[in-house]
Amino acid sequence: MILTAALGIPLLGALALAFWPRWQEQQARVFAIITAVVPLLLMLWSWVRFDPSGPLFQLVEEVEWVPSLGMGFRLGVDGIALAIATMSALLFTAAAAYPVDTKGMPRQYYAWVLFLESVSLGVFLSLDLLLFYVFFDLNLVGMYFLIGRWGHGRPQYSALKFFLYTLLGSLALLLAILGLYLASEPRTFDMRELIAQQPLAGVAPAAGLVLLGFVLGFAIKTPLVPFHTWLPQAHVDAPAPASAILAGVLLKMGTFGLIRIPYSMMRQTFADYALWLAILAVISILYGAVVALGQGDLKRRIAYTSINHMGYTVLGIAVAGALLEGSETARQLALTGATIEMVAHGLITGSLFLIAGSFWERGKSYDMDYYGGLGAKAPMMTGLTALAAFASLGLPGLAGFVAEFHIFVGTFGVYPWLAGIALLGILITAALFLQMLQRLFFGKLPPQWSGFPDLRVSEWTVLGVLLAFVVIIGVYPSFLIDIIEPTSRWLVGAG
Amino acid sequence: MPVGDLLPELVLLIGAVVIVLFASFSPQRLQHWGASLALLTLAIAVVITAGQGEAPPKLTFSGVWSLDRATVAAKLLILVSGGFAVALSPRWMANDRRHGEYYALILFSLLGAIMMASATDSMELTIGVLLSSVASYPLVAYHRAWAPALEAGMKYFLMGALANALFVIGIVLIFGLTGATGYAEIATELNRNPDPVVVIAALTFVFIGLAFKLGAFPVYAWMPDVAQGAPAPIAALLTVVPKIAAALALARFVQLLPVSLAWPWVIAVLATLTMTLGNLAALWQQDLRRLLGWSAVSQSGYALVAVTVVGATDMAVPSLLVFLAAYAVANLAAFGAVTHLRGRTALKHYQGLAHVRPWSAVVIVLALLSFVGIPPLVGFFGKLLLFQAAIDGGYTWLAVVAVANTVLSLFYYLRVISPMIFAKAAGEYAVLGRGSAVVMLGAGLLVLGLGLGAQLLIHYVDGVVLLPK
């Protein structure tokens, strides 16, 4: 019941907020934070209960939903899902706690955040393909309303573009899911069953098409270049906590989905096309980094670094799935690295987007040249931003380094030349973050910022917690790796 | 004569006659009792029909009338949809000095639809098509003092008269070719390769006739006008009931055709055109009711996807029925909300609805998201089964077309949702009364409830086939 409670409680909380008309801003916020913490505690409890030496999927819960179709309410975790779901729960707590302008509709705002928490955890915890799709799609609805109502700039346009574009990805995914389902025997949406069956193995054109559907669906969500154009716009106009959720949690659904579905359920086809996926990933890495370097808008810059980082993750996944056997160690490192990258990126980029929100609140602008020389005025902001930026560019001792190190070592073992090209991305990322810090915090202080307020307690505590985990993963990664490793070992076929 | 097999239809007929008599001899202030009589009639018919679903499938009345589970499911849908339309009507029609026979016309139009859905004989089908059309024309133009209603009625009538005439010619040609009216004999004779030119002409005419009832290419232009000009409860009725009946009639009819005719391709092309044209026309509509009308056209296209694969997969008929049920519920919810809001039409008059009438807004949002197929709403399961049948039947490209159209349709549904939720309220929102609110909320609840409880729906139609097969 732990997992059901983890996604049921925020949903009930969302309903309570929606139907309880008397709550004011402060009450709604406190209630939302408390409700958002519960799934985090439940995930930590699952972490304790999870047995790394046990079976692949643990804490399994199963109730029939539409037995005529072979669809059930099936939940369960492996190491990868557990790590990402826990990170998501943490990020949602942070998003709920981060101060934000709710435009006079606090109940609705927090209700949507909690709804989104529920359905996001659902994506990572479900063990049923159709249930996975249900949660995957509901995310779009939640994010659409968050951006459209509480965004700034041209929120409705951005929300519309986000919904249309990502629905296209969802529907491609749905067709692929149906393709896989129709090929299974007996027909089922049970993921465990499908992983065991490996339907479509060796069915040449059909398997390729189904894989294409999955990759298209997840590439839009992740996003991979050239399917990324919805992302910067959505980020810029979204409220800061929604941006943090979008980057930290929603993008992970693409890469997590890649591991969970095509990687696990169609091993052979995935291996056949892994090189193409890896090339796409390297293009994303380089393109994301180069375009990020050219952005003068703080949020756009962070958004493009997301494309770069998600590129590393996809590269790790593609490498891990490139072969059916052989190079197990390298492939396992790559897959472990991809998972750590997801966790690290969620924490780091989530923090960066929250910081961008603090800038917006103070200056109503994301233009980096509009700020400058804030180092002395806002030391706390400078310090935390610098920490997040260094983590993001992969400084050793921080979480981003652990992830990228694993991925690159793994990639060198399988596609050494691709690893060589992708390394360029790290260089550009370093440049763009250092330049960002310089433009925001160093140089001459513009006169209008002589009264620039530093981070408030409610802001720096949230950022402090998120970034503390970045440091912990950086210096003591084994607590995370121990959970992920058995799963990635199983997934690369090394027993 | 197994008269008992026709009990639900007889109940409808008697109910309609009683209402006509009642309306003729009762004073104006009692006219609204017609609604209660109609609901009572429908309730009895539903109970009897539900009982028919338990019996094994069979043909009755010398093979002209089918009593299989698929037909029973469609009949239930038709009757329940009719019930929703009737329940929405009393307050809406209250200002009309004489509206007793309005309810009788609804019952006649439902009877025609049921005949279309049940017919396994071309003459029976013809009568169903004609009865359903004739009873619907006056309903569309019931607001006889209002120009748009007359225009809609006139368009509906002219298009219908032409389509029905062609339909009858098609049926006559088939009779001439095969010498039979029963479906089983027609199928046998058509398999003996009669003159292909005549066959193609006949089928074209029959398709046109059914496309009119379905609101599909090429005879779909009446749909937005009816949605806009007819009384709002009738708009709800006519965008749903004839579609269910015609989809079933068409699915049953194409089963008779020999494979050599490549009819699935024809239907697939019609499906593509209907979906795409309906969606494109809806994109920039400034009038919610017209937009819902065009969306109803595009939904006919999705229904045709299931008809395309009727011969290729056993999932086709169940998926068609689930899709139609999902569509019916969502469309009734949407039009229920429009009726409840006194039929307001212009999109800009819906600005900020969520702040003033949150429940109406919630129902509209649920209905539109169900059209898109967002889970776990009932529309999701409709589309899921539809795509599944299309892929299983070897028409993956058609599923891809349907997907592209779904994304396209989200654009205009969001054009409705976005100002409703994000904009500030523009003035007052008068509503019709408690009756329409209950109906609207009931339909909205079904959109969600039948999605969460999709097992009920899917289990009921699991493995059904259309006789004679």
Image (spheres, rainbow, N blue to C red):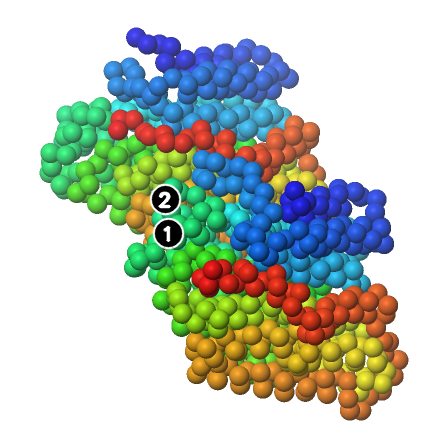
The residue labelled by disc 1 is: A199
State the residue in front, A330 or B36. Answer: A330
Write the residue at 48% across / 46% down: A190
Q: Are marks 2 and 1 in contact (CB under 8 Å)?
A: yes
- Same chain shared by disc 2 and disc 1: yes
The residue labelled by disc 2 is: A185
State the residue in front, B244 or B430. Answer: B244
Image spot of residue B341 (x, y percent): 65, 39
Neighbour tally class for label 2: few under 14, some 14-19, many 20 plus, Cα within 10 Å: few
In the picture, measured across the screen, residue A281 lies left or right of residue B247, that is: right
Write the residue at 29% across / 26% down: B467
In the picture, measured across the screen, residue B394 lies left or right of residue A228, that is: left
Compute the Cα span from label 2 to label 1.
8 Å
Kind of residue at badge 2: Glu
Write the residue at 34% across / 56% down: A201
Report the chain holding disc 1: A
Q: SS of the residue at dot 2? A: loop
- Please indicate, yes or no, whether residue A415 appears anywhere in the rendered image: yes
